[in-house]
Image: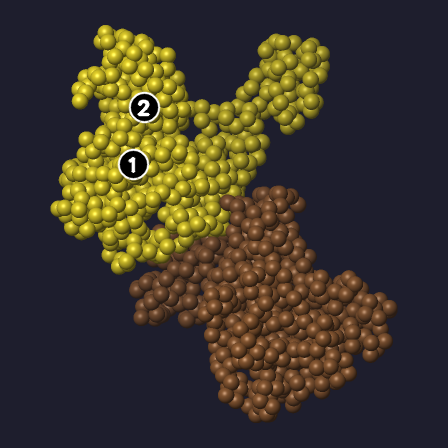
Chain colours: A brown, B yellow
Amino acid sequence: MIELTIDKKKVRVEPGTTILKAARQVGVEIPTLCHFELCDMGIENKPGGCRICVVEVEGRRNLQPSCITEVQEGMVIKTHNVRVLNARTTVLKLIISDHPFDCLVCAKSGECELQSLATQFGIRSLPYEGEQSHYRKDTSPSIIRDVDKCIMCRRCEMMCNDVQTVGALAAVNRGFMSVVAPAFEMNLVDSPCTYCGQCVSVCPTGALTEVDHTNDIIRALSDPTKTVVVQTAPAVRAALGEEFGLPPGALVTGKMTAALRELGFDYVFDTDFSADLTIMEEGTELLQRIRRHLAGDSTVRLPILTSCCPGWVNFFEHNFPDLLDVPSTAKSPQQMFGAIAKSWFAEKIGVDRKDLVVVSIMPCLAKKYECQRDEFKTDGNPDVDFSISTRELAAFIKQANIDFLNLPDEDFDDPMGESTGAGVIFGNTGGVIEAACRTAYELHTGRSLEKVDFHALRGMEGIRSATVDFDGLQLNIGIAHGLGNARKLLDEVRAGTSQYHAIEIMACPGGCIGGGGQPYHHGHSEILAQRAAALYTEDERKTIRKSHQNPSIVRLYDEFLGHPGSQKAHNLLHTEYFPKSNEVSIHLNGHNGQ
Amino acid sequence: MSKYNTHLLVCAGTGCHSSESNLVYEMLRDEVMRKGLDKTVQIIRTGCFGFCEKGPILKILPDNTFYTQVKPTDAREIIDEHVIKGRKVTRLLYADPETNSPILNSTQMSFYKKQLRVALRNCGAIDPENIDESIARDAYQALGKVLLEYTPQETIDVIKQSGLRGRGGAGFSTGLKWELTARNESTQKYVVCNADEGDPGAFMDRSILEGDPHVILEAMAICGFCIGANKGLIYIRAEYPMAIKRLKIAISQAKEYGLMGERIFDSDFSFDITLKYGAGAFVCGEETALIHSMEGKRGEPSNKPPYPAQSGYLGKPTCVNNVETFANVPVIILKGADWFSSIGTAKSKGTKVFALAGKINNVGLIEVPMGTTLREIIYEIGGGIKNGKKFKAVQTGGPSGGCLTEKHLDTPIDYESLAAAGSMMGSGGMIVLDEDDCMVSVAKFYLDFIVEESCGKCVPCRIGNKRLYETLDRITVGKGKPEDIEKLKNLCSVIKDTSLCGLGQTSPNPVLSTLNNFMEEYHEHVYEKKCRSGKCRSLLYYVISEEECIGCMACKRVCPTHAISGEKKEVHQINQEICIKCGACMEKCQFDAIHLQNDYPKVTAII
């Protein structure tokens, strides 16, 4: 143990501890900006670039960045003397001097960490006037880059490269014009970006934000010729409450449903319904592949990979174009919902698909891109018209002055609001494969599964594996969340060394509960754990916890689809994948053109 | 075998090469062949003599004749007169700048008299592309000695005792650096030679690499032996094609001779060297940035610790030394630590190479013992200030250094005294400024460079230096405000205090040292809107002389901003608030009535 003194307080810490963390142990909270951590997941960004966290260390000539400086025996540290405060304030003023002063209209206002620091430091004047760096604004289907607001904290770069291994973002240029951008400052759409949105979820300022579709939805809601249907993803109900001051993990399913009805949606449905449907199709495909494999068919591809996560789909299309036949062909729950809503349901209520607007509320930014994919359109009309994030929904509810906290709990509409506990846990890493196991077990063995909780499949480790006993059939299950972890499992598949029969992959750390469209967690990883726990609670509360027992799903197959894997199901609920080049295409549009 | 009695040494350094020294060489060779002298006259292309401003240089041995600015067409005369008839070609001899009389023997040149060439000892003396000439000057003897006679620790002790310190700028003890790297256990370690010379106007490393490449290879191998590394990397600027070419030749020749590669001198020690090219970023001279660049990453520094000695190239213990540092190593081994430490001052041993430039008569590369005074360098070696102007300051240490003044002229130069005077040793840039130089503009010049070269990683360097530059720019165009000076001081101290790497931590030095030593010039710019040297164009004023003006109205008609007033046949006046200093009036005036002056032409200065 190492003993040191911080602001006259003695502290003993493990060797290798940084000053920042040692200070926290004695209740000294040193302000930071570029430093970012999701400690439960081993994710940390500490380039030591912003210099906001500098402290004075006796005997050292210069101020030291507390986020990367490790403690030494006998160190004497001052975290708030005049020298330190002047340095921090000057540095903060310098950052602000190269930042647009448009807080009033910035998408990040209220959530911006730079803004919070300016408030905390009481910045009232800007003595360092001068040129501001300007860059081209870049809009993609999911993410907007307004890098005039980039403060070079490199969090997005760390997420994109170290955690996700996507490699779309990195620091470019030198000196004053340094900024994080795709290579050659090309557009995000031309880069290997998967739209997972993890860059957005860690950006401290408004440099990276989502494309906002709220106004499109308002327009649809106010159009009397349109019937507007909304679906809400599992992870949304576990996080939306945070935007209204509720503690993380507060389940707001009923209030969310009521709010959506207040906002004017004609039918409030649940993506959990189509999650159950996904299990029917994906679980059937899983069993079919395994049975063929056991029967000695060497052409069958195993493991089967889940395909619910659009960020993950983009990732393998970019990085593993040689393995496009490995993932399940089942569409994601969002797209299954859209396909059924605009066929079965539209017929039911006698509305032409062109007059039915399907909106999705998602914890995800890649969903925005997914619903715009050409293969999910019929005659140019998309199965899902607009996808908005949990954050956008919260802003919409606030804008409509709905008193969210005092809303009565309401239920989803029929028939696409019915769901089981299996659909709910889709929002957690491991949830999809657990739901699939519940159904596949019963379909395979023909017997009822008594213990539906597969605890071995749960948890927050980046890569997990478990063997599930299907009455003698030992199924090896792999689970990865975070695309860097996914890459490791995919490399095994490519090398032919994978031991798994089935792998679940979610692009975002924690799964959808940690999605790029969720309320900002600002590095508090316990928030993710609380959201995950909430979904398991909702699962437990459900009377039906196996997808194939969802009465609406049973009805859907009886009335419309026939059986899982039928031709009709294939046409509506399955898709194909396309190789995406990772080659760099350079657009000579210059970095300074505005 | 031929026995030569005359040696013609033609400088083939980059400077002389670009003024056609290769043609001089060819013409001399042709002439020697034609006259059938090739058995007795040897012509060698050498490395740099340091006297680059007067290149191409031709030195003739054994009589130490020093010809400057030799043209290819001079070859015949040199061979006929000097070589055959023994009569020196007076018009090509270097002439003393003060007496104007030609100097017959180069040892009499004041440029060389005070110099002591240790790192540069072979530059200008050997053909760098011929390993035999290097070996004749003791190359690889030191390597053989340590491999056969010393343990690694004994070798490290010699280097430590010699007092050799890093010549790249920071001045860390070389022996200690080796020892720290040696102590870190690892199956793989690396020796890196930092040849990413980036200071504007500095070329000492280039000259050593071009003139004596084997000394670097040998020293790297010695370092590898000491720290337990069998792999060396030279990180060299891609803008140094000649140095790269000569290094490649040297490496292949050394391998051919068994002086590099497997089991050198039949010992258990193997060592191999590869070249890595830098893409010309100044910050890559910082060792952590250099390592990142070698790894193919963005060239930006990272926090220390961990030091490269702990975790460097590819995460392995790595010893990074500068070219000039390495150039001192073999000679220390051969002549001993005591010999080396007898040169220099109490804490700074040996010599230092400087690139002498600016308003000085003898521009070039010099090497002097530590402790030589600035006065000796400027007035004796440098031959004094050009055109008899008055000395104002000398800028040392490159862009991160500072300006020293008259009062520092007798300070013995070493790491400590330069730092105490507010400058630094740096890699050895030395630019002399005279009374025509504006010190605010000088600070602005260096900041401009820093702003260009900052890697952009940390805020104080990325934005702070930009704001420093902008403030200085405002001051030089007459828009400085009184509070700017305090702002500059605070910004400088915060940038020094909070920047991530050495580049950022020293970047405000040009501003701080000019603020310390030339505050009155800042005050003149800010309060009186005056630049005493007349360098700041915005602070020059067009005025009409009452004596000369006849009131012809020609200037008034031509003024694009109607800044000139005055009736016909009356003296005209220029309104300084409106004047844009285009100079059209002065050009038009046929009576020389319009002058430029650097005092604001009103009774009271505006504030």
Percent position of residue A144, x then y: 64, 57
Q: From the viewer's perspective, is B326 left or right of A138?
A: left
Chain letter for the residue marked with disc 2 in the picture: B
Residue A516 coordinates in the image, percent (x, y): 60, 66
Residue B392 visible in the displayed image: no
- Residue B11 is labelled as 2
User: Which numbered dot is residue B83?
Assistant: none
Residue type at the position of mark 2: Cys
Q: Residues within 10 Å of mark 1 (few under 14, many from 20)?
A: many
Residue A207 lies, in percent from the top left, at 60, 56
Which one is nearer the viewer's eye here, B550 or A68?
A68
Q: Is residue A143 left or right of residue B403?
A: right
- Please state, as top left, top right, bottom left or bottom right, where the C terminus of chain A lies in the image: top right
Pick the front one: B215 or A378: A378
Name which residue lies at 42% across and 42% down.
B278
Residue shown at 25% from the left, 26% from the top: B125
Q: Residues within 10 Å of mark 2 (few under 14, many from 20)?
A: many
Q: Give the x, y percent position of residue B511.
A: 44, 38
Element at label 2: strand
Observer-side mark, 1 or 2, equals 1
Horizontally, residue B191 falls left or right of residue A560, namely: left
Three-letter code for the amino acid on which mark 1 is drawn: Ala
Q: Residue at left 26%, top 59%?
A: B185
**Which residue corresponds to mark 1?**
B250
